Image: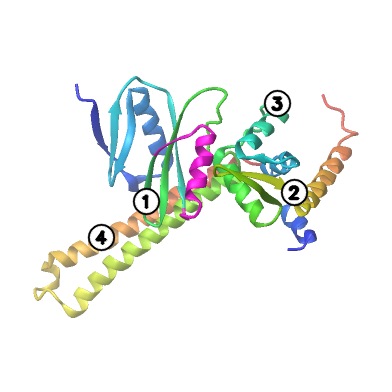
Amino acid sequence: MSTEKQIKAYLPMSETAYYILLSLMEHRHGYAIMQHVEAITAGRVRLGAGTLYGTLGKMEKSGLIAVIAEEQQRKVYGITPAGRAVLEAEIRRIRELYKSSEGVRLK
Amino acid sequence: MKNEKKTRRWIWLGLPEKEERYLSEQSRKGWHLTGITVNRFHFRRSRPRDDQYRIDFVGKKREMEARLRFYEDAGWEVVVDCKEGFGRRLYLRRPRSDDAVLELYTDTESKIELLRRFKNAWIRDTTLAIITTGLGAVNIARRNLVGVPLMQSPLFWMLTAGTAFAVGRAIWQGVLFYRAIRRIKGDKF
């Protein structure tokens, strides 16, 4: 799949996918992703093991992430150039969302 | 007092949620799941705990070990891993606490996917049951294999009842799945 198509297929991203990709800017294994996501969202986003396992499998299959190493059956993942392109497109989309909300005063 | 017991497991009556709740209740009473045979839960008695049980369903055997390892790393104990029709059912548990993620599936998409995996396996099981019992009944009716008037043949009645049961079960499960998926989607805007 071309990057163009992948961007179309993945955007807008679910929070799960977004935070997984963001975590994989550094190489991490599954459990480390969970902890990282929980830490950067101050406990708001907590990924279930089943959800994480399934999403990692799908992302690996479609080439957004890759297995970098395997230690005692624990896979260490990292983002691929294609994954990075998709993540960047999503970040641009989120910035636009944010910018369009600037005029709204919160009560 | 006996330290082991077996209870009936009504596998065909509902969604995994009911089983999960039942197993958690048992753990609070001090009965902890040790195994499963076709339609029985096996428990052993010890100190009451507040355990969260979750049932996962995996269609493909591939990478089963990696998945189990993953769940264990995340703090789940894999209690039973049983074959069910075309897939595997995993019974997982962990003690309830505030800092643990108590759900296996935490977003709408993956919750629905899990339900679909259960549903697809059930559809395959039920189709197989309907085809075998239905064909059997039709075959007897057509060739009158039993040599007695059809309406007096217990085999014919058994097969017909089997078909009816499988069809009824399929409809009941269809309704349950439809409602469960609607409920999950309802969480979302």
Instruction: Identify the residue shown where x is 44% and y is 37%.
Output: B92
Q: Which is closer to the viewer, label 1 or label 2? A: 1
Residue B65 as seen in the image, left or right of residue B109: left
**Compared to B31, does B110 lie above or below?**
below
The Cα–Cα distance between marks 1 and 3, rounded to whole angstroms, is 39 Å
Q: Nearer the viewer, mark 1 or mark 4?
A: 1
Q: Are marks 1 and 3 in contact (CB under 8 Å)?
A: no
Say which element carries label 1: strand
How far, Cα to Cα, is label 2 from label 4?
A: 48 Å
Query: Residue B184, position in %: x, y?
Result: 56, 43
Picture mark count: 4
Viewer-proximal residue among B180 and B107: B107
Frontmost residue, A49 versus A69: A69
Q: Quadrant of the C terminus of chain B?
A: top right
Residue A42: image tag: 3
Q: Is residue B178 left or right of residue B23?
A: right
Q: Which residues are magenta?
A: B59-79
Q: CA distance from mark 1 to mark 4?
A: 23 Å
Question: Mark 3–mark 4 contact, CB under 8 Å?
Answer: no
Please rate how many residues cluster around mark 4, counting C-alpha atoms within 10 Å: few if below 14, some from 14 to 19, many from 20. Answer: some
Residue type indicated by callout 1:
Lys
Q: Earlier in the sequence, mark 3 or mark 2?
A: 2
**Amino acid at circle 3:** Ala
Closer to the chain start, of discs 1 and 4, is 1
- In which quadrant will I find the N terminus of chain B? top left
